[in-house]
Image (tube, helix red, strand yellow):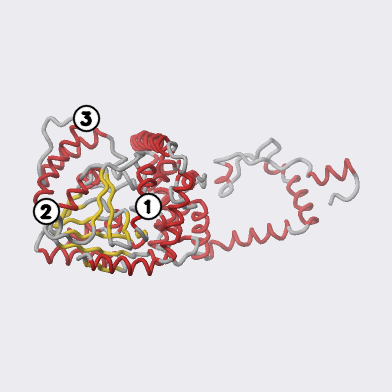
Amino acid sequence: MPAFPQAAKRELANSQLRHNLADATSTIRRKRADVVGELDDWAQLREAGAAIKTHTLSNLDTYLEQFEAAVTAAGGTVHWARDAEEANRIVVDLVRATGEREVVKVKSMATQEIELNEALEAAGIDAWETDLAELIVQLGHDAPSHILVPAIHRNRAEIREIFQREMGKVGAPAPADLTDEPARLAEAARRHLREKFLRAKVAVSGANFAVAESGTLVVVESEGNGRMCLTLPETLISVVGIEKLVPRWQDLEVFLQLLPRSSTGERMNPYTSTWTGVTPGDGPQQFHVVLLDNGRTNALADEIGRQALRCIRCSACLNVCPVYERTGGHAYGSVYPGPIGAVLTPQLRGTTSEVDQALPYASSLCGACYDVCPVAINIPDLLVHLRTRVVEEHRGWRSKPMDALMGLASWVLGDAKRLAAAQKVAALSRRVIGRKGTIGRLPPPLSRWTDARDAPAPAEEPFRTWWERNRGGDAR
């Protein structure tokens, strides 16, 4: 992936993409505003969500051990993964132990983050995405572009073409007379996935929340595919980021109000599935949880940056971001696009690559993301914090001219006489850079500024000179 500026320039040339995004995000924004406006205590719920998450992160070691004990007591097995490689190895080994060569998946951003599908494919194991949008992305040999709606960059006509072209290669084909009506597209996906649900013996899931006191995992979804994955297979493997914990079952009362309203603009998700360990004769009889670090403890060590781990993956910040709406998710070079991705990804992956160094700058700092975040993550502050880190970590000869310029500015502005002299020089410079109201075209590299904006020309007479001439006395 190129860095964000280059990737964004490419995506901006795609008018169909911008139309798809504008239409989808405006619809979600409107629905969210309607259902949030119904609650008189929304601000208090938001504060409660932020407080619960902050408390959990401050005591994460304790709650992780409590969660492991509860899962084990309920008949499950907990695995710890330091990074993507270790997590993928654990999942591949667990699937191989069953003797199966395929798995069905319910949407999990953690498995996308670690590129689990690619690891399973390399091991000769087929992984089938069952979320409708994820299915579209997988069949289209594409990448997700949104946290909640991974195929938001596709319209109905494009989806119809993908289904007709690809479904028959990996399962039940799409009907020959398939149209782009939503109901027909959903029917084609349902027929295609049904045989996979009924055949699969192993499922891989993520989790929206993990309850420390009971060892319960929670998945909320809108289609029922998650319920099929979580109940039909014999073995269930859940890959969960360590930040997904909440201390108590009671805490779900807060998050199950915040999440659906902020994500899909619904009062409740159509399907809320919870499962705790293993129940003989009912559901999967082998249950594994892979607790994933993969850079999260690095983020936790940053007292400012750790608030990004409060994220509940609602995508509200994406839907209000003017930058995301025009560039889409692919420009971010990460499974986490938009404002939250711009602050989370550099903390998880570090800022050694050009892509990750550019992400904190992929924002206008308008603050709309903070206003809608259901757990009050101050994303603008985090962006500035991470920009500072990028600059400090990558100081070199390129920063010397700017350092020198800032030092000169400090020296001039630090003394009234020096500032007065600089103002007089600036007034005399009008003879060189232009006498009109704005500075004209300058030679490169200065033209990189004046080509894109109008800079005011210096005044003919500095204020200090005017004051001395009209009022007399010391200009200070």
Q: Kindly identify which residue carries mark 1.
A: 312
Q: On screen, 75 above or below 327?
A: below
Q: Kindly identify which residue carries mark 3.
A: 181
Residue 155 shows in this picture: yes
Looking at the image, residue 459 sits to the left or right of residue 214; the answer is: right
Dot 2 lies on which element?
A: loop
Which residue sits at x=34%, y=38%? 17
Quick one: label 3 or label 1, which is nearer the N terminus?
Answer: 3
State the image coordinates of residue 229 (x, y, percent, origin top left): 18, 51
Q: At label 2, which amino acid type do we have?
A: Ala
Which residue sits at x=63%, y=41%? 455
Quarter assignment of residue 86: bottom left
Q: Which mark is residue 328?
A: none
Q: At label 1, which amino acid type do we have?
A: Ile
Q: At label 3, which amino acid type do we have?
A: Glu
Q: Are marks 2 and 1 in contact (CB under 8 Å)?
A: no
State the image coordinates of residue 216 (x, y, percent, origin top left): 27, 59
Which mark is nearer the camera, 3 or 1?
1
**Residue 141 versus residue 320: which sits nearer the camera?**
320
Q: Kindly identify which residue carries mark 2.
A: 200
Which mark is nearer the camera, 3 or 2?
2
Dot 1 lies on which element?
A: loop
Q: Could you give the CA–CA distance between mark 2 and mark 1, rounded to whole angstroms?
A: 29 Å
Quarter assignment of residue 325: top left
Dot 3 lies on which element?
A: loop
State the image coordinates of residue 169 (x, y, percent, origin top left): 11, 45
Q: On screen, 269 above or below 298?
A: above
Quick one: label 2 or label 1, which is nearer the N terminus?
Answer: 2
Looking at the image, residue 165 sits to the left or right of residue 298; the answer is: left
